[in-house]
Image: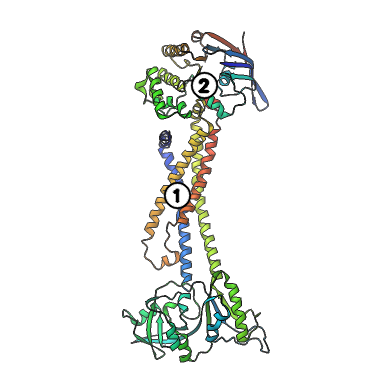
Amino acid sequence: MIGIFFRNLFRDLVRQPLRTALTLSGVVWGTFSVVLLLAFGASVSKAQIKRFHGMGQGIVLVFPSRTTLPWQGFLKGKAVRVTPETVEAMPEKVPSIELISPEFVGSRLIRYGRNEYRNTVRGVNPGFELMRNTIAAKGRFIDPEDMAARKRVCFIGDVLATDLFGTEEPVGEAVFIDGVPFLVVGVMRTKLQSSNYNGQRDERCAFIPWTTYSSLYGAKYVSNIIFRPRDLGRSKAVMEDVKGHLAKLVGFSPADPDALGVWDTLDFEKQFTTFFLAFTVFLGVIGSFTLLVGGIGVASIMRIVVEERTREIGVKLAVGARRRTILWQFFSESLVIMLFGGLVGFGLSAGVLQAAKAFPAGGFTDFVGVPVLNPMVIVSTVLILLAIGVVAGMIPARTAASTDPIEALRK
Amino acid sequence: MIELQGITKVYRTGSQSLEALRGVSLNIGKGEFVSIMGPSGSGKSTLMNIIGCLDTPTAGEYVLDSSKVAGLTFDQLAAVRNRKIGFVFQNFNLLPYATAWENIELPMLFDGKNGRRRRERVTELLNAVGLLDWRDHRPTELSGGQQQRIALARALANDPPILLADEPTGNLDSKSGEEIMAILTELWREGRTIVMVTHNDHIAAHSERTIRLFDGQILP
């Protein structure tokens, strides 16, 4: 029975090979567009978020500024000054902070042998590594022992390492920062970084313990604070706590909106993610319309097929076919065209995506990523294909099933 | 077997209405061979469609094989046509893309009979109509007489007690026509009820009883 069903189905489809092929092509192209657009949208989102994570993951940046409200006898416009010790003591006051680091930033001459550059030097603590994704490719990041002993050690960005050392091995060598020798303890792993603040990108920076920084250069007040809340969803509330405590310790009105500049990357990332989701959905909708046109092609061709085969339908009804049997016959025919077209479209797009992998990394692919057939793309496409297929198949099949056998046999 | 009581059929097209049958009462017993004659537009086809459960009467009672037909759904009527009635048409109405074998098999597929039973029955029927060698041929490769024999075999597939033949020899030469009539007569002798529409007195002479329709009514 099933065998007969498929044999008849196949016979009906190959009876008009050109027509079937043309109908198929619409579906193939539609599926191809849906897959490629969705995959492209997903990869662009992923690449952009990855680039954004280059600056750090789950962090809030706080920039001490000037007061804009008078407070306890001080006029507005007073500089907000935060010492690194205050920053280090914050987790005791605000337990919902997971990691926090003060940061000093300065531009200094860095020399190795005959190579000398003026680059950004950042004085930070060991927590900085995880917060800002400055992961060591060679050696290590600054550790607590370096902090306690105010060691003259530095961790350098990968581009700075190449600029200074060329092909030489930097770890274990000494560089001179403003004439003072520092031991290189590690080199940062290459990363993409789309956002930044205060100075150069991490790839060109040298990182040293803030204790060393302040004792060597006499810096008392931090350029900025960087922290990560334990619960990433509560960054706003944690920031409020931090602000409240700083207001008390440093002396500014807790109501002052601009005493501290705040860059909540978590909040930013939420908007960012929403934007890219909308972007991907938009692309998917465009693709779906292409597929819808393919579906309309199937539906209209099937209407013609039903028209041509009215007599056949009449005969079948006369000898005892139920309406459901006729419905299913035509519905399955449309659905097979849709699914087969979908399969070919999937195959083609998989081929194109495979070819896209051959693009060299860097440059172009840093921005759009490498589109791949991920489960989201596959599931969405199959659902869109099925939805359109069912509608496109149902309309002509219902027409077929509602044929009046007497009329049909008279033709 | 077939009991019609005051059957009326009215076709409505827009504001006009056409009375195709006007109170037809008719009894056809089991094993009878009845022919229905009448000029075009006398309501022969409508009557055949109602007897064949392809159409339902506007008014009147129809009892087929001691069960009422009125009020059955389309799919229930389909089941009645499938098991109790075999149709033979003037223009054969075979599926053009299907082989002789597949055409005969069709009613059994709709009845859900299994593969072995279908094979046995189709072979038996092809043998009976003498076309076993033509089993894989399509209708277009067969002569009119052969096509009508395949159509007859299809009508008999589910072994229905009633055969409805609408001008079965209308598209055939006289020799093939006689062959078909010989088969129909044989089937009647075996105990099947046969109702046949014809224009031809010579063909009608094969039947036991002739009913004449005129203007939607049976002439006495």
Q: Above or below — where is B98 with respect to A32?
A: above
Q: Position of residue B204 (x, y in %)?
A: 51, 10
Rendered residue at 54%/39% (across/down): A395
Element assignment for label 2: helix
Residue identifier under label 2: B84
Instruction: State which chain disc 1 sits on.
Output: A
Q: Nearer the viewer, mark 2 or mark 1?
A: 2
Q: Above or below — where is B53 with respect to B26?
A: below
Amino acid type assigned to the residue bearing label 2 in the image: Lys
Q: Position of residue B122 (x, y in %)?
A: 40, 23
**Quarter of the image where the N terminus of chain A is located:** top left
State how far apart marks 2 and 1 are (Cα): 50 Å
Rendered residue at 58%/71% (across/down): A234
The one of A337 and B76 positioned closer to us in this rendering: B76
Q: Position of residue A299 (x, y in %)?
A: 51, 41
Residue identifier under label 1: A29
Q: Quadrant of residue B135?
A: top left
Instruction: State which chain disc 2 sits on.
Output: B
The one of A130 and A409 positioned closer to us in this rendering: A130
Asked whether the residues under the numbered discs 2 and 1 touch, taking CB atoms below 8 Å apart as contact, a structural biologist would say no
Q: Is residue A411 visible to the viewer in this orientation of the structure? A: no
Rendered residue at 45%/56% (across/down): A375
